[in-house]
Image: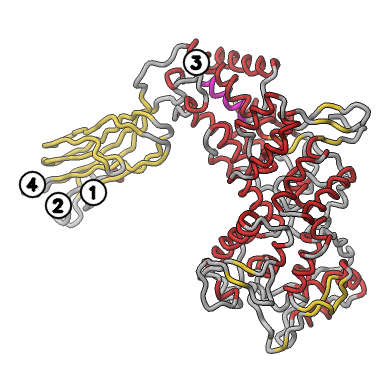
Amino acid sequence: MGCALLVGLAACVGNLDDGNGPSDPIDDDPAGTQDVELSSAALRRLSIHELENTYRSVVGFAPQAIERIPPDSLTHSFDRVVNAQTMSPAHLEAFVAIADEAATTLMTEQSLATVVAGCPAAQIPSLAVSKLVSIAGNALSLGPEWAVGNAGNPQWGSTTYAPDPTAAYTHAFPTPGAYAISATVDVNGTVDVMELSVNGEAAAAATTVTGLSTVGATVTIDAVGSYIIGLSLDTEPDDNGLAVVFRSLTIEGPLQSTAEPEAPQVRACAMAVIDELAPRAERRPLDASTRDRLTSLYDGAVASHGSAQALHALLEAILSSPRMLYMVELGEPVAGRPGLFRLDDWEVASRLSYALCEQPPDEALREAAYRGALDEELEAQARRLMAKPCARGTVERFVEQWLWLNELPSLNKSPEIFPAFTTEARDGLIAESKRFIAEVIWNEDASVAALFDSDHAWPDASTAGLWGLSSASGERVDLPNERAGLVTSPAVLAVTAPFDGTSPVKRGVYVLEQLLCDGTPPPPTNVAIVPPVPDPNLTTRERWAAHSSDPACASCHALIDPIGFTFESFDGVGQYRTEENGLPVDAAGGIPSLGIEDGSLVGGAATARAIASSDALRACAAKQWLRNALGRLETSADDDTLTDLAGAFDAGSMQSAMLTLVTTEAFKHRRQDTEESP
């Protein structure tokens, strides 16, 4: 029945492709200037991370089929921005596969009883159909080691046997339950003991086995997966040249150990699924029409497919519903303000929970929405969520995606040029970056500036060499003057450099676009973007300075290169250096867009501190947080909101600044162009 669900889902969401698709983190319009007038979307697809969390919240686990979803685009840095989202047949197929896996698991492992109180295990019908699997044993024929050599290469019945008197077969069990397993052998002689085992645990044994014999047992398989069925012999050699041929292995099941529930019991379970599970999946109470539609779906499926398949189809429909997979934010029109829609309490509850925790509303938030009290309790609920571990995870992911730290797990460097950048060092950079974010934002309750001018870090033994330290143990260390904050950490310096060197342009663009939200125009279409070739007689700065002197490139490079040059005192993995190719490194530069002229800053730390003290950083942090939290690019209607947010990032800690967003009109409303339809 998945095909029908697939078509229905496609009809609901097939027009949502308004993004640019996947791209490199440096894109032609990083600040979103081309999209700034777009209305805030009424539908936003949950990111893969959000969908995993949503499944865990709704059914208690994240199906493995989630891995089939195409990767989320990071065109606008964050995986939640609707402006970059696409919808493809691969997405639709993945969503149905995920729902199918979840529904099957809920029924076959009877975990449905743990998530729907009105659906006890006795009312859940068996979904699996018993099957008989028979494996021919010729390829698994065996014989005792003492028999080998009696006739050079002994055979019996034209079947060659192995010298080891054991056999093993790996079988994938499709569902938990009882299975009848038996092995048939043909013994030329007598075997004292023959044992059948499952994953090394004895299941059955037979003694004094001779001729054509079978040993078997009914075993209970607790979880879906592959198990090793083993057969072993225990006997003494005799004078008759004992030989054993493993003829076959049969596996039948799952067997029905109890009577199936009656149709009325299953229907009661289905109605409980509709009343309990569907509202959690849709993150709001069901309206009458939705309840009737789901009831009709179940009753119709019973007539054509039976109760078990009907319950499975009902679960699949609920879990592949657009309201499960999407943030649905319609709202009600605000009188006298065309194009402005006030979100209802359930929509605000979801927006708040996904903004701070990337998961569905918890019980306290749902209860507040049910009472219609969120308008007055919103700030208190936000503070409550911000104190939970889920908010720490969300803020950590926000900073990682904003600063490109999410690229570290897949980052590789030339082992010849950067031997210190080992797998252990890379893993260490990931861990210490997470530690830095947690310490600065949560334990120190610091401002956004501290991300860029902090004078301490937490390197460990695997990263000490990259920091220029003789040793480190994960404890706090004070940084030397040439470093300040994350932007001069080996982690950021590594992700902003290519495989085999440094790139002043990439680092300069990174600062402009990610930290200052100052978009650079795309290069002229008639100009080939080719980095200067390596030259052992020149520094990287000298090579790029000559390359950027082309009049067609000079105007943009005059804004970019001075920033990137200040980081040339660090190599491609963030190691401090004063020389390159035997020549002195010139790390003088500036930030022209901030009025800091070329030559007035020397070294990456000076640039980091200039960024930290700038109003542009606060404004950019506000913009980046709005994009991440609301899952969309800013519009001109957000100007007042962004001004308030920037002021909050300037006045206090990152925690308090991020919470400021929930008090704004932008958080509680959706804006839509008056010529569009909802």
Q: Which amino acid is tagged 4?
A: Asn
Q: Give percent across and percent down for residue 533.
A: 75, 78
Graded by Cα atoms within 10 Å as few (under 14), some (14 to 19) or many (20 or more), the crowding at tag 1 reads: many
Q: Which mark is residue 240?
A: 4
Marks 4 and 1, how far apart at CA: 16 Å
Magenta part of the chain:
308-319
Quarter of the C terminus within the rendering: top right
- Secondary structure, mark 2, is helix
Q: Give percent across and percent down for residue 159.
A: 25, 45
Marks 4 and 2, how far apart at CA: 9 Å
Q: Are marks 3 and 1 in contact (CB under 8 Å)?
A: no
Disc 3 vs disc 1: which is toward the camera?
3
Quarter of the N terminus within the rendering: top right
- Secondary structure, mark 1, is loop
Marks 1 and 2, how far apart at CA: 10 Å
The residue that mark 2 highlights is 147
The residue that mark 1 highlights is 161
Q: Are marks 1 and 2 in contact (CB under 8 Å)?
A: yes
Q: Which mark is first along the chain, 2 or 4?
A: 2
Q: Give percent across and percent down for residue 638.
A: 86, 44
- Secondary structure, mark 3, is helix
> In this rendering, would 434 be left or right of 519?
left
Tell me, yes or no, whether the highlighted magenta stretch contains residue 254: no
Graded by Cα atoms within 10 Å as few (under 14), some (14 to 19) or many (20 or more), the crowding at tag 4 reads: few
Which one is in front, 221 or 559?
Answer: 559
Graded by Cα atoms within 10 Å as few (under 14), some (14 to 19) or many (20 or more), the crowding at tag 3 reads: many
